Image (cartoon, helix red, strand yellow):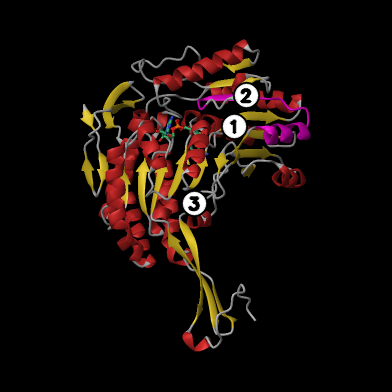
């Protein structure tokens, strides 16, 4: 059995706590590796190494730091196939989707090449008599990232690339479900020229997380995962005086107006609802057709497409649309929610509860499910399912539909399909959700914009990547300077006013 390690102080270090987690191959259900779960002492060892290395890294000029990112990008392209294979084997997603996971992280690294530009401060010459005023952005010191299982390449890169480009050291605590790609990323950063101790991977569970939250030398914490843990981390890290941003779960609606191109809408729903087995925070999990006529016409198109989806292991290549769920518990939870939907009166229009894949009976596969006539009091509507299950809630009117999305406690993503620009503009303006798609089902912003949901999907002031990342991972120092020749009077006890 393969035993994974931490990556501390520029090298692999085996776990010392005696505690391990199981890393599965979700397609076969077999345990393929053991991941060490760090103790407080192991986390502290990484912090001490980061503390030693960070000041020299912060002193490296930003252009040179950006060059490390350039080299890292080259290495990511070089190793893309090998990384995608490891990712698919631990996560279960298809190979093209695994490449996409790496690519969407890599794009944030590309954005970090502009670090010298983003770290430029403001300057006001002669703000007062012989007085110049300027601001600069300085790194925070040590930042930590706690990341989820569903994007084991993209989300770690969204966090560590800007943090490190700004001159911080970074400690990554990736998901214990699929930790191998994050470890490989740290190896590649070292190969790209990053000094030892600047990017470290400490594997673990809540023990390591709590050690991060309480460590006095960690200045900032970024989290992505489920909402209850996001809320916990946000409150704990804030209470210990850290800068913190936490991104949580989601329930993303797609509104289909009567004038929409229903073929396009149906294709969009299939991709956004079932891609990666629905294990995406930006997956569409609720279809909201407006009016019964739209709903009937949409269901007529959707049902055969959902029936035709091919479920299987990533090793089957292009013959598979989506793979297994991450664990047996996830599978049981999703099947339990499907059962509750049936019990609470929703219509199960596509039913694969008996799904089993020959040769992969122990894998964590769940077939595609489609519900119609779901109501807002049902558990399948109230909970994030995080599986290949699309619920259809029929809305009576546009106002009913926009209200449904806006009143939902989550506010990550939402989409509207319509041919009417006026409706689309009104929707974009009024909907109470952070990321909006118009005739576009998964509106994940590109690297040069920022990513972040509202309400129970995001806690903290700033979004991830784009210009916000530079605000999050630096603090502003503002300098008022006057040279001695300008000081001609005695002491003044009044607050300075520029005259
Ligand atoms: P999770 O909350 O179970 O785990 C996320 C991280 O928190 C992991 O590193 C895990 O080890 C740690 N953790 C888990 N339980 C903990 C505890 N009790 N105390 C301290 N730390 C703990 O989430 P997951 O299952 O890995 O990921 C799926 C969730 O992430 C979904 O809810 C999904 O919507 C969400 N997600 C959100 C975004 C976003 O940007 N909003 C992006 C991706 C995933």
User: Bounds of the magenta span?
Assistant: 386-408
For label 2, the SS is helix
Query: Does residue 53 appear anywhere in the picture?
Result: yes
Could you say where residue 120 lies in the image, as x and y percent from the top left? 48, 68
In the image, 209: left or right of 44? right
Query: What whole-number distance in Å separates the C-alpha atoms at marks 2 and 1?
Result: 8 Å
Cα distance between the residues tagged 1 and 3: 22 Å
Q: Nearer the viewer, residue 221 or 165?
A: 221
According to the image, label 1 marks what residue? 251
Q: Are marks 2 and 1 in contact (CB under 8 Å)?
A: yes
Instruction: Name the residue at 33% across, 31% down.
Output: 89
The local secondary structure at tag 1 comes to loop
How far, Cα to Cα, is label 3 from label 2? 30 Å
Q: Position of residue 351 (x, y in %)?
A: 55, 15
Q: Is residue 490 above or below residue 154?
A: below
Residue 381's tag is 2
Q: Residue at x 48, y 33 (%)?
A: 229
Q: Is residue 223 magenta?
A: no
Task: Name the residue that disc number 3 marks.
Answer: 465
Q: In the image shown, does 389 or 188 lie closer to the viewer? A: 188
Label located before the other in sequence (1 or 3):
1
Name the foreground residue: 7 vs 481. Answer: 481
Q: Is residue 83 visible?
A: no
Q: Is residue 119 left or right of residue 124?
A: left
- Lower sequence index among marks 3 and 2: 2
Q: Is residue 204 above or below residue 128?
A: above
Q: Quadrant of the C terminus?
A: bottom right
| Residue 389 among magenta residues | yes
Q: Earlier in the sequence, mark 2 or mark 1?
A: 1
The N terminus: image quadrant = top left
Does residue 393 appear to the left or right of 205 in the view shown?
A: right
Residue 74's label in the rendered image is none
């Amino acid at each position: 059995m393969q035993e994974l390690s931490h990556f501390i102080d520029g090298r692999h270090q085996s776990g010392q706590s005696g505690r391990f987690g199981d890393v599965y191959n979700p397609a076969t259900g077999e345990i393929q590796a053991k991941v060490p779960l760090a103790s407080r002492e192991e986390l502290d060892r990484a912090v001490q190494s980061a503390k030693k290395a960070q000041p020299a890294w912060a002193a490296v000029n930003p252009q040179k730091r950006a060059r490390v990112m350039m080299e890292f990008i080259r290495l990511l392209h070089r190793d893309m196939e090998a990384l995608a294979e490891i990712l698919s084997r631990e996560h279960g997603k298809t190979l093209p989707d695994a490449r996409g996971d790496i690519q969407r992280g890599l794009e944030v690294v590309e954005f970090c090449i502009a670090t010298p530009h983003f770290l430029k401060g403001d300057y006001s010459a002669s703000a007062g008599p012989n007085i110049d005023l300027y601001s600069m952005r300085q790194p925070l010191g040590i930042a930590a990232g706690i990341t989820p299982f569903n994007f084991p390449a993209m989300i770690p890169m969204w966090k560590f690339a800007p943090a490190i480009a700004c001159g911080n050291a970074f400690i990554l605590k990736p998901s214990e479900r699929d930790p191998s790609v994050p470890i490989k990323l740290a190896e590649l950063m070292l190969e790209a020229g990053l000094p030892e101790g600047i990017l470290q991977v400490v594997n673990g569970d809540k023990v390591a997380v709590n050690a991060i939250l309480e460590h006095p030398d960690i200045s900032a914490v970024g989290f992505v995962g489920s909402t209850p843990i996001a809320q916990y981390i946000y409150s704990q890290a804030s209470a210990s005086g850290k800068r913190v941003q936490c991104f949580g779960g989601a329930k993303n609606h797609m509104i289909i107006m009567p004038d929409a191109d229903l073929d396009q809408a149906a294709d969009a729903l299939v991709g956004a609802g079932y891609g990666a087995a629905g294990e995406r925070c930006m997956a569409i999990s609720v279809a909201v057709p407006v009016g019964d006529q739209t709903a009937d016409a949409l269901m007529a198109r959707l049902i055969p497409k959902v029936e035709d989806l091919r479920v299987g292991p990533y090793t089957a290549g292009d013959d598979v649309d989506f793979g297994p769920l991450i664990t047996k518990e996830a599978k049981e939870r999703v099947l339990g929610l499907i059962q509750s939907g049936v019990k609470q009166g929703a219509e199960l229009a596509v039913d694969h509860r008996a799904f089993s894949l020959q040769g992969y009976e122990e894998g964590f596969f769940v077939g595609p499910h489609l519900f119609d006539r779901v109501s807002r009091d049902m558990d399948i509507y109230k909970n994030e399912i995080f599986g290949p299950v699309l619920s259809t809630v029929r809305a009576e009117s546009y106002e009913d539909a926009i209200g449904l999305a806006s009143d939902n406690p989550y506010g990550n993503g939402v989409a509207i399909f319509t041919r009417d620009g006026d409706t689309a503009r009104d929707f974009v303006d009024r909907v109470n959700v952070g990321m909006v798609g118009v005739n576009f089902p998964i509106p994940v912003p590109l690297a040069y914009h920022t990513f972040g949901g509202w309400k129970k999907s995001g806690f903290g002031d700033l979004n991830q990547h784009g210009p916000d990342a530079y605000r999050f991972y630096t603090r502003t120092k503002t300098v008022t300077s006057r040279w001695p020749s300008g000081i001609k009077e005695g002491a003044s006890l009044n607050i300075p006013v520029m005259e």
